[in-house]
């Protein structure tokens, strides 16, 4: 059982307070949200500059060349007198008195004399023509992208005031896990460690490290005592088995369990706890698809709130054809867009990420759902980059390669024609 899924999703955002603001160097600002609007401290360009390589000229030609200016040179003492020209490079400051820059393609030079016909354009970028001093360029809350960094630099900034991003440390637990290579008998290749950095980054968190913990109570106690982060994410050990120490270790540290199990499938043993020192602990179930579901249920909203991001709205869409719902639990399943509707992908049992890897979104089916509309949780990082057509074409290729067979209980498929996604059924 546990808390209803919508309550867990909401509470994970509501319980936390934003971490506040900090001033960071441009090099460290990427991905942050602006805590203040970005204003132009200087105009762009900062003075009149040549937009073409050529000659700055005053009055009518022919002109006598009286100097040369390259980008970065100090401005010509000017003003340029009628009949004079200065050889000038793109980006160099245009002196007063110059009416236009004559591009090299439109002129001839003999000794110090230049002739040619200026076109209709002056080929001068005037001071403040692109951005005026004091312009508000971006609002508070804008994401600092590579272009934002370049823009901020071009108007004279070395630092930006941003919302702090939560520091997140991951502890992957499970003595059966292997971090590299092919798992042998009794071993399982860690699928959650590689998945979490992207999920954390897309949710606005800064990953500060991934630890691999043995299934040993002392290791859990030490990890909870020593981990320096705003949020500690623990994968595995959320259940009730002999090696599942997380809840006992949290109790020993007098943690408050804000979420202690969620009535959803998969992912029901997930938990969200607050430690007395203000850190949060998110427990993700060990089954990889259940871990992804739990990350989108409680980790993403928690990180969003700590990083001053708005709660992610949950749009709805029709899911066709509708699978059967659960009477008491919310069901989350992998789905792809087909026109304006969602279609189930299948291959999304708790232990496998195949369905999620093919999916655009998770469909959220409330208990007793009869359709057609479901909640839509877009998968962090966007769609996997395959169009619906490309994805449909990928299925038969994978089958022909023989690397994946239908799971037991699923209908087997004839590969003489491409199967539709509907034929590729699966699901919980
Ligand atoms: N008696 C009960 N047993 C279980 C229940 C329950 O309610 N009562 N719930 C089941 C459900 S649902 C889930 S989900 C799991 C959650 O278990 P844990 O969070 O304690 O995780 P583990 O036991 O360590 O692992 C479960 C499963 O996942 C594999 N695993 C673990 N970590 C990884 C990883 N990083 N990468 C890939 N696979 C991983 C692990 O080998 C196990 O097969 O509990 C059920 N049991
Ligand atoms: O959370 Mo478990 O089966 O729901 O994978």
Image: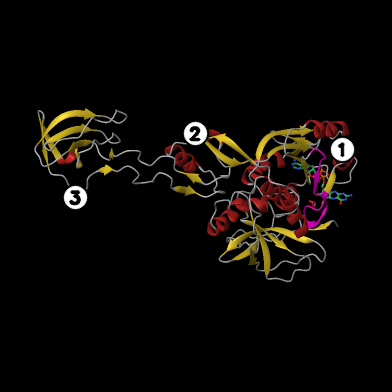
> Ligand 1 closer than 8 Å to the CB at disc 1?
no
Image quarter in which the N terminus is found: bottom right
Indicate whether residue 270 is drawn in magenta: yes
Q: Residues within 10 Å of mark 2 (few under 14, many from 20)?
A: few
x%, y% of residue 157? 48, 36
x%, y% of residue 112? 11, 29
| In the rendered image, the vertical position of residue 409 relative to residue 62, given as above or below | below
Between 299 and 405, the residue placed more toward the observer is: 299
x%, y% of residue 240? 89, 46
Image quarter in which the C terminus is found: bottom right
Element on which disc 1 rests: loop
Q: Is residue 365 left or right of residue 201?
A: right
| Residue lying at 68% horizontally and 71% vertically, measured from the top left | 372
Q: CA distance from mark 1 to mark 2?
A: 42 Å
Between 127 and 350, the residue placed more toward the observer is: 127
According to the picture, the residue beneath numbered tag 3 turns out to be 120
Who comes first in sequence, dot 1 or dot 3? 3
Q: Which mark is residue 158?
A: 2
x%, y% of residue 140? 55, 48
Element on which disc 2 rests: loop
Image depth: mark 2 or mark 3 in front: 2
Q: Is residue 294 left or right of residue 37?
A: right
**Magenta segment boundaries in residue numbering:** 258-277
Q: CA distance from mark 1 to mark 3?
A: 76 Å
Contact between labelled residues 3 and 2, with CB atoms less than 8 Å apart? no
Q: Which mark is residue 253?
A: 1
């Amino acid at each position: 059982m546990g808390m209803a899924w919508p309550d867990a999703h909401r509470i994970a955002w509501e319980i936390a307070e934003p971490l506040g603001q900090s001033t960071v160097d441009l090099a460290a600002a990427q991905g942050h949200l602006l805590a203040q609007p970005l204003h132009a401290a200087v105009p762009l360009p900062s003075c009149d500059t040549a937009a073409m390589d050529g000659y700055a000229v005053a009055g009518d030609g022919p002109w006598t060349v009286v100097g040369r200016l390259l980008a970065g040179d100090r401005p010509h003492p000017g003003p340029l007198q009628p009949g004079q020209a200065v050889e000038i490079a793109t980006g160099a400051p245009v002196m007063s008195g110059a009416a236009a820059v004559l591009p090299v393609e439109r002129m001839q030079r003999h000794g110090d004399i230049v002739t040619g016909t200026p076109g209709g354009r002056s080929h001068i970028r005037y001071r403040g023509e692109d951005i005026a001093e004091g312009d508000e360029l971006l609002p508070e809350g804008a994401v600092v992208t590579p272009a934002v960094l370049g823009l901020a630099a071009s108007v004279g900034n070395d630092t930006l005031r941003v919302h702090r991003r939560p520091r997140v440390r991951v502890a992957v637990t499970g003595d059966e896990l292997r971090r590299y290579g092919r798992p042998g008998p009794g071993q399982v290749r860690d699928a959650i460690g590689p998945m979490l950095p992207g999920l954390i980054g897309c949710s606005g968190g800064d990953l500060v490290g991934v630890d691999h913990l043995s299934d040993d109570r002392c290791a859990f106690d030490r990890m909870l005592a020593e981990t320096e982060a705003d949020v500690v994410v623990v994968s595995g050990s959320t259940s009730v088995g002999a090696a599942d120490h997380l809840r006992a270790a949290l109790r020993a540290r007098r943690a408050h369990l804000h979420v202690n199990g969620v009535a959803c499938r998969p992912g029901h043993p997930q938990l969200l706890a607050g430690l007395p020192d203000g850190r949060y602990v998110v427990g993700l179930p060990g089954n990889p698809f259940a871990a992804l579901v739990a990350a989108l249920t409680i980790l993403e909203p928690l990180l969003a709130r700590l990083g001053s991001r708005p709660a992610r709205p949950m749009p709805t869409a029709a899911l066709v054809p509708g699978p059967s719902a659960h009477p008491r639990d919310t069901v989350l399943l992998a789905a792809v867009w087909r026109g304006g509707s969602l279609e189930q992908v299948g291959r999304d049992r708790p232990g496998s990420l195949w369905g999620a890897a093919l999916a655009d979104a998770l469909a959220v089916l409330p208990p007793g759902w009869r359709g057609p509309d479901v909640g839509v949780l877009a998968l962090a990082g966007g769609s996997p980059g395959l169009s619906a057509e490309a994805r449909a074409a990928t299925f038969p290729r994978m089958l022909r390669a023989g690397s994946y067979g239908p799971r037991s209980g699923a209908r087997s498929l004839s590969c003489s024609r491409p199967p539709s996604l509907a034929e590729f059924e699966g699901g919980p």
